[in-house]
Amino acid sequence: METVVRVIVLYLVILVGLRILGKREFGQLSPLELITLLLVPELVSQAALRSDYSLTTGIVAITTLFSLVFLTSVISHRSKRVERWISGTPTVLVARGQLLMDNLNRERISPDEIYSEMHKAGLERIKQVKWALLETDGRIALVEEKEPTSSASLAG
C-alpha cells in the first residue's frame, strides 16, 4: 500500500508543479502526458534494475499511475472546471494588432516570440494580427486581420 500512496503523492506534486510553471513549459504535451512520461521510467527502472527486489511493487506502481491518469482524464472530461485547472485556458497575447503586455508578462512570452511566429505565418506587421493566442499546449496560434475592402475597390 505504501507504493500506491507514494505514486499518488508524486503524481499530485508533479501535477501542481506543472500548473505553477505554466502552459508555455509543456511544449506540445498535455500535463497528463508529461507526468506519465516523467514517472514511468522511474517506476519501471526500480523493478527492472532490482533496486526494489519485488517485481510486484513495480507493477503496482505502474498500475497506480495509469489508474490516476485514467481517472484524471475521466474527471476532466466530466468537469469543465477540473479540465480548466489541469489544462489551463488559452491566453490572448495580441488583440486587434495590440500586444497585451500584462498577458505576455504573466505567460513569460517576449514580443520577439510573437514576431517570430508572425514571420513564420508570413505576416510582417503586428497590425496584421487580429488575435494571437497562447494555446493550452504551449503553441502560439495567430489569426490574421483581414484587410477591409473599400467600396471604391468593389466598384472598380
Image (spheres, helix red, strand yellow):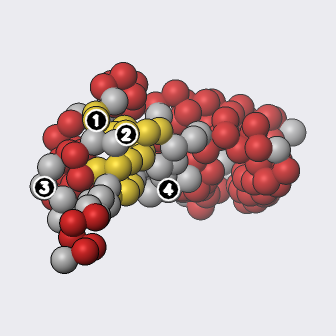
Reading the image, the residue beneath label 3 is: 124
Mark number displayed over residue 98 = 1
Name the secondary structure under disc 3: loop
x and y percent of residue 49 in the render? 55, 57
* Residue drawn at (79%, 54%) of the image: 77
The crowd level at tag 1 (other Cα within 10 Å; few <14, some 14-19, many 20+) is: some
Reading the image, the residue beneath label 2 is: 95
The crowd level at tag 4 (other Cα within 10 Å; few <14, some 14-19, many 20+) is: some
* Residue drawn at (44%, 57%) of the image: 28
Q: Nearer the viewer, residue 99 or 14?
A: 99
Residue 68 visible: no
| Contact? badges 3 and 1 (CB < 8 Å) | no
Q: CA distance from mark 1 to mark 2?
A: 5 Å
Name the secondary structure under disc 2: strand
The amino acid type of the residue labelled 1 equals: Gln
* Left/right of residue 119 with respect to residue 39 in the rendered view: left
The amino acid type of the residue labelled 2 equals: Ala
* Residue drawn at (37%, 39%) of the image: 95
The amino acid type of the residue labelled 3 equals: Glu
Residue depth check, mark 1 versus mark 4: number of the one nearer the observer: 1
